Image (cartoon, grey):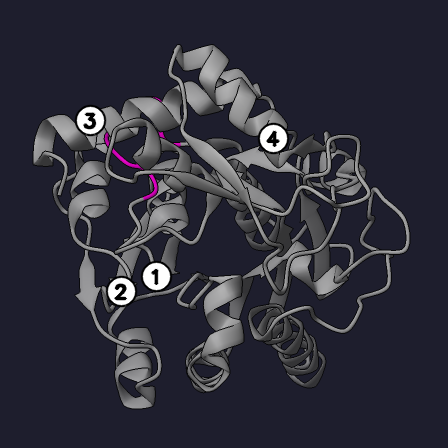
Amino acid sequence: MKNTVLVSGGAGFIGSHVSVELIEAGFDIVVADNFSNCDLTCFKGVKKITGRDDIPLEVMDFCDASATKALFAKYPIDAVIHFAAFKAVGESVQEPVMYYKNNLLSFLNVLEAAQDKGGCNVLFSSSATVYGEPDKVPVTEETPRKPAASPYGNTKKMCEDILQDCVKASNGAIKGILLRYFNPIGAHPSALIGELPRGVPNNLVPFITQTAVGKRECLNIFGNDYPTPDGTCLRDYIDIVDLAKAHVCAVKRMLDGKMAQPCEVFNIGTGRPLSVLELVNAFEKVNGVKLNYRFAPRREGDVTAIWADPAKANEQMGWKATRSIEETLKAAWAWECHLKTTYGNE
């Protein structure tokens, strides 16, 4: 009998890629999303890539406790991967109440529904933002968490603590894994799913591709006076397909009873730092496209430099990032070109 995984926020950028990898790994999935920051494009792409037209889709909001409990009652859920959260650092600084309300309440409702069900395996989509401005890099899972640089980062820290407390109180009924992502970028090699922000992108790569395709006039690089080799921030950019595969490894680890402790933490990154300017230059080189960009003032909430030490995930989960930055940026551009061909420059 197949295990069933609930993917909350499963129609979005990360959720859609994880859905593909779960299906290809032999899992049944249930996708649930309120479509507040996405549309049906990627969900339809998942069905095309996998050849599965029967994927259950529930249109609902995880901030609705009764709807969340009804969802857990409707399906035989063995594990839940929680993506249903707002995720833009800059927006969270401007709209902190919106971020705290959505990101905390949605996760609390998932955990309450899991408790009511008698237990569940919970995989939480966390972030490297919990490390704040680290004292040294690369960061390991033992690196102290710092005061968050943004309300978004603070919601990730708070949800981590909530899950750990719930696991501790559940007497083994709830098990948890926290995956701390670094900077997911790219698209599926099929160019049928990718990052599709509504309005002006908050993330770098979709802003790059939209500028390259002519949808945006100019790319802003926020800050060129950081204490880094070229003055721009250093980040750990991980291919979205590599990231999605990490979720499959984590779910299998929970379901196969291989966890070393009831709640585990893993960094999901490449371990290779790349500056914002290096990423822009790499995109231009690999795709033969010239970008119009300019340097803008620093953005509140951004840290100077952070990248992962992924050794723990490599050794204990058997997962490793394998895709090159060139492959990733080619896929991101192919996705943007697919969107233009399909929908025009809307």
Q: Name the residue under label 4.
A: 277
Q: Which of marks 4 and 2 is nearer the N terminus?
A: 2
Q: Which residue, given by chain and number where applicable, does mark 2 sit on?
A: 33
Asked if labels 1 and 3 touch by Cβ distance under 8 angstroms, the answer is no
Q: Is residue 153 left or right of residue 125?
A: right
Q: Mark 3 points at which residue?
A: 338
Residue type at numbered disc 4: Leu
Which residue type does callout 2 highlight? Asp
Which residue is nearer to you in this view: 154 or 254?
154
Q: From where the camera sits, is residue 68 visible?
A: yes
Coordinates of residue 239 in the picture (x, y in percent): 51, 32
Q: Looking at the image, which residue is at 20% across and 26% down?
A: 338
Of badges 1 and 4, nearer the viewer stands 4
- The label nearer to you, 3 versus 1, is 3
Q: Of marks 2 and 1, which one's residue comes earlier in the chain?
A: 1
Pick out the residue farthest to the right: 135
- Mark-to-mark CA distance, 2 and 1: 5 Å
Amino acid found under the numbered disc labelled 1: Gly
Mark 1 nearby-residue class (10 Å; few <14, some 14–19, many ≥20): many
Q: What stretch is highlighted in magenta?
A: 187-195
Sequence-wise, the earlier of marks 3 and 4 is 4
Q: Mark 3 falls on what kind of element?
A: helix
Q: Which of marks 3 and 4 is in front?
A: 4
Give coordinates of residue 149: x percent, y percent: 68, 68
* Above or below for 319 versus 138: above
In the picture of the structure, the residue carrying the numbered disc 1 is 9
Q: Which residue does the image show at 79% across and 38% down from the upper left?
A: 228
Image position, residue 36 (x, y; %): 25, 67
